[in-house]
């Protein structure tokens, strides 16, 4: 036994001290409170972010454009929100890179109790808005998030390009996510572009609020929530970014395979005492919740969305997607 211990001691001396466990990497995550961001909440709740060597802190924002200011000032490292504001950020010299998608075709359009019946009787969506204005004496007031956001861009695309509504018949009103949900429930807005869990919540509370257009109808292959990393953080912590993406891949798989297990993690982040796990599980399984991780799957749709943003004036020019997307962490994360 003594000989064995001596041999071990000699070997340890030759090899030097064993490396200490790496210190966790602090990461400041900005996120909007929607089902599309569910993978990051699940990854946190399951302990997979910690397992990846990350020490995350979360800050909630009302929209992507608001979060860009925090990104530019260096107060967050990771952005979990819509793709559209990132194109604007890059045109302003902010180095931010999309390393993962989380969901597609999130945004849907709902009509409140006053507006919804017009869609049931009119021959087209445009005629529904026209009939509403003729009867009510005003344009339909439609809530969405600020200009430059995915919800705003998607709503305008659906109104003017798909439904071909007359601009005199619909008024787009920007506001925060929570305010949008409350305005629709209170009848202060006639309709809105919303996403889960707001879709499930408003319809449970008032079945007279009707789903009028799905995400695919509003903007085909609509790019939704993404995970983007500030350039300086990515360059300094490449292993941490890869670990983050690997955790998101696992979380996305869990959301698809076992919504019941995933739901409590999402409810803890989104519930705020106003909903429950059962509602969140229903939202996770909704047709408006399509979870993905591969950032390459949304490149073409992102180009299309950028092109439309240029036409409506929320983007000066299209940003090269070669700099906007970095699929290398994802490719490493899924490599066998």
Image (cartoon, grey):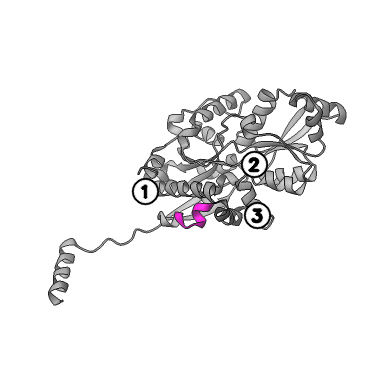
Q: Which residue is mark 3?
A: 278
For residue 274, side relative to residue 254 (left or right) = right
Specify start and end residues of the magenta stretch as a single range.
42-48
Q: Around disc 2, counting alpha carbons within 10 Å, would you say few (fewer than 14), some (14 to 19), or many (20 or more)?
A: many
Q: Quick check: can you spot residue 40? A: yes
Which residue: 75% across, 31% down?
Answer: 171
Coordinates of residue 249 in the picture (x, y in percent)? 46, 46
Mark 3 secondary-structure assignment: helix
Q: Quick check: can you spot residue 74? A: no
Which residue: 45% across, 50% down?
Answer: 247
Check residue 195 in the rendering and tell me which mark sits there, or answer none: 2
Q: Quadrant of residue 184?
A: top right
> Is residue 213 on the magenta stretch?
no
Q: Which residue is mark 1?
A: 239
- Between residues 243 and 321, which one lies in front from this camera angle? 243
Task: Please report contact status of discs 2 and 3: CB closer than 8 Å, yes or no.
Answer: no
Quadrant (top left/top right/bottom left/bottom right) for the N terminus: bottom left
> Is residue 45 on the magenta stretch?
yes
Q: CA distance from mark 1 to mark 2?
A: 32 Å
- Between residues 83 and 208, which one lies in front from this camera angle? 208
Which of the two discs, 1 and 3, labels the residue nearer the N terminus? 1
Q: CA distance from mark 1 to mark 3?
A: 36 Å
- Between marks 1 and 2 in the image, the one whose residue lies nearer the viewer: 2
- Between marks 2 and 3 in the image, the one whose residue lies nearer the viewer: 3
Which of the two discs, 2 and 3, labels the residue nearer the N terminus? 2
Coordinates of residue 56 in the picture (x, y in percent)? 48, 55
Which residue: 60% across, 23% down?
Answer: 311
- Between residues 161 and 77, which one lies in front from this camera angle? 161
């Amino acid at each position: 036994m003594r000989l064995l211990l001596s041999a071990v001691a000699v070997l340890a001396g030759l090899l030097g001290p064993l490396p200490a466990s790496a210190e966790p990497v602090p990461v400041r995550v900005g996120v909007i409170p929607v089902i599309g961001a569910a993978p990051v909440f699940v990854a946190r709740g399951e302990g997979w972010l910690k397992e990846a060597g990350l020490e995350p802190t979360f800050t909630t924002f009302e929209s992507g454009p608001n979060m860009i200011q925090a990104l530019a000032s260096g107060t967050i490292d990771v952005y979990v929100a819509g793709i559209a504001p990132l194109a604007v950020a890059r045109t302003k010299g902010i180095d931010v890179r999309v390393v993962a998608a989380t969901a597609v075709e999130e945004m849907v359009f709902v009509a409140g109790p006053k507006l919804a019946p017009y869609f049931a009787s009119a021959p087209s969506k445009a005629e529904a808005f026209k009939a509403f204005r003729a009867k009510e004496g005003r344009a339909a007031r439609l809530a969405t998030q600020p200009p430059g956001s995915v919800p705003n861009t998607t709503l305008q695309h659906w109104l003017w390009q798909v439904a071909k509504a007359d601009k005199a018949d619909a008024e787009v009103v920007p506001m925060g996510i929570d305010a949008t949900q409350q305005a629709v429930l209170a009848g202060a807005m006639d309709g809105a572009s919303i996403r889960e869990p707001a879709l499930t919540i408003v319809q449970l509370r008032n079945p007279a609020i009707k789903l009028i257009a799905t995400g695919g109808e509003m903007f085909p292959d609509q790019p939704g929530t993404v995970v983007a990393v500030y350039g300086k953080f990515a360059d300094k912590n490449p292993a941490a970014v890869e670990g983050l993406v690997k955790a998101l891949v696992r979380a996305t798989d869990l959301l698809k395979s076992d919504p019941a297990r995933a739901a409590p993690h999402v409810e803890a982040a989104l519930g705020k005492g106003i909903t429950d796990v059962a509602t969140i599980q229903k939202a996770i399984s909704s047709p408006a919740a399509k979870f993905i991780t591969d950032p390459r799957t949304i490149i073409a749709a992102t180009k299309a969305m950028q092109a439309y943003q240029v036409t409506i004036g929320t983007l000066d020019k299209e940003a090269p997607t070669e700099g906007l997307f970095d699929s290398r962490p994802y490719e490493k994360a899924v490599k066998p």
